[in-house]
Image (cartoon, rainbow, N blue to C red):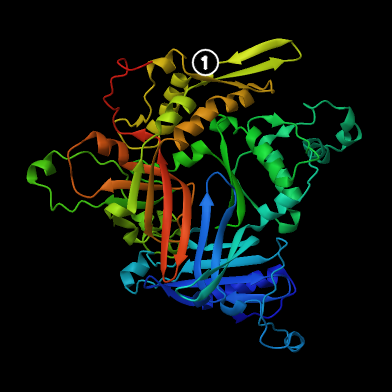
Amino acid sequence: MINVPLFNSKEELTEFVEKNSKKTTVSIDNRDWFFTVAITNGKQRILLTKSSIQNLVIEEDLFTWYQKGYITVRNKSHHLERSTMPDKLLGKLGLSDVYKIRGDGRDLIYINISPKLDYFQSIIAKISGMDTKPDPDIYNLSNDYAIYETKTSFTEEEGEEYLTLYFWDLRYQLLTERNCHYSTGLVKSKEDKEMAKEIRMLNNKDRSIKSGKAIRAFIEEHLEDQKPKFDDENWDDGGTEIFYSSPAQYKGANDLDWLMNMHVSSDSADNDFSILKYDTYIDKWTLIPISKYFEKATKKDAAGEYQLDKFHISWHVGKPNIFMSLLGAKKKTPSLKLEDFNSKVKSKKSLLPIANKVGRKNINTGESTELETDSWNFSDLAGIDNQNLLTTYAVHSYNMGTHEFNIDVYKNELQTVVEKFQKDFIEKNFLGDPPTTSLAVTPNKKTRHVMNNMYELSNDEKIRQGKGRNVIYKNLIFLNNACSLTIKGETHRRCGRFFSLDRKERYFSNDYDEKILGQYFVVNVKHIFDGESYTNEVLGVKPYRFAEPEIELEKIIK
């Protein structure tokens, strides 16, 4: 642990951490990394050295907009908090050799980690723009977090005492505390000054705004002190207008959950659902329709902008014979092109025209790697989810104005939704002749002997569709076949991206490979620094396969 001079503001500390990360190089898994972790309570600031850290885990999940994790530090004889010199003397020097834990959610931890890569020295590489300097918005694992819980542990064998600090995004901590008193009517009145005079006399419809704009306005207003920035190109304004006023018992986190629950993507995204994220790589908020993610999985037969990894399953049986080579199965994953190994930033300096047209991934060729048997695990769609959650959703509503009951069934009927999902999500975005949605619609689902009934207060057809069709979309994607990987760590791995799984050698087509090979949508990533090792645990889902399974659907129990 290293004493850090006192700073007058959070911005000064953040700047110090970022500069220090470029100077502090550590070796992990025989690779060099810029590695900086600092904690502050507003008075004492301590820079945690790599040797003082037992382990560090940073987790990102697609279903939460914020990151979380924990760090365990060596704390023998409580030296983190016990002073070895008089506090008054250290105070006059502007230093402190201890850290006093506040315990009020205002102990902050700043993390900045990125790979240190040497440039290719060859002239050809430089001319073609193939320098390997990492792009910060792809490789820089950096954010500020609030410590919400601590735990002390002791190991008798090693005689070591450890302190574990559990943290999550500072912005989330603030929203769990704050009573925000938010209203879309007040947001709208700021845009229309005439409306402000009569806002209390207006009905809820007139006080409504687009759901995406409501979410953005909420973040701007109630995280104003964090100076939120937004990625305008990746922000969906929504396809419906909603009215919302915060209940007295709600905290900011509850308000944001409600707004997201009512959000339906814009008409250009066919009113599907969106994913809200605070993107730590670019330090901006994003709200992206799910269809936009899938559109970036492939680009013709090549890996799309959002595919960042390609893996091969270990074979270990020698080279395939000539007969198999001639009759091997067709390719099931997109190929890696020049743009997958290069940086647009560096390519602007290139003298070769082709290099100036490449993308921004800057992928290291070593990432097209071979997986050992014990490093990956495939899981089938669970039968209980198939039968209970992948069914028709009949959405019931009542129109108080016309005194009519409505039941939306057709657009929310399973077979109709699967056919649309197949056309808009699967056939357009993945390789195959053609690929097919990984779900068999059984007779009892066709006849609606198995179905779910939902009730929705809103009379807006698009919002009701969000409670029916979009729920099936979510279940088709996130409850489907999945693959988990435990692999050598890289800081670029994140949620909302794709990895592909393939076999390196040729093989005969078979039902198993038709099911497991292809591109997976990443829904959970863990960055695990444990001692001298760095690994990623990655979970991806795959809602399609390359051929329909030969299953007898009629001869089953209905």
In this image, 42 relative to 303: left or right?
right
Q: Quadrant of residue 148?
A: bottom right
**Residue sitting at x 33%, y 32%:** 435
In the image, farthest residue toward the right = 197
In this image, 542 relative to 95: left or right?
left
In the image, farthest residue toward the left = 322
Tally the numbered discs: 1
**Residue sitting at x 46%, y 21%:** 414
Of residue 87 and residue 311, the one placed in the foreground of this image is 87
Residue 347: percent from left, percent from top:
42, 61
Q: Image height check: is 464 above or below 374?
A: above
Of residue 359 and residue 270, the one placed in the foreground of this image is 270
Q: Image height check: is 46 above or below 435?
A: below
In the image, farthest residue toward the front = 156
Residue 208: percent from left, percent from top:
75, 31
Q: Which residue is mark 1?
A: 410
Let me know if residue 337 appears in the view: no
Quadrant of image for the N terminus: bottom right
Q: Quadrant of residue 251?
A: top right
The amino acid type of the residue labelled 1 equals Tyr
Indicate the secondary structure of the residue bearing disc 1.
helix
In this image, 111 relative to 176: left or right?
left
Let me know if residue 445 appears in the view: yes
Residue 443: percent from left, percent from top:
38, 15
Quadrant of image for the C terminus: top left
**Residue sitting at x 61%, y 39%:** 236
Residue 370: percent from left, percent from top:
28, 55
Would you call the spot at circle 1 few (<14 residues within 10 Å), some (14-19), or many (20 or more)? some
Q: Quadrant of residue 110?
A: bottom right
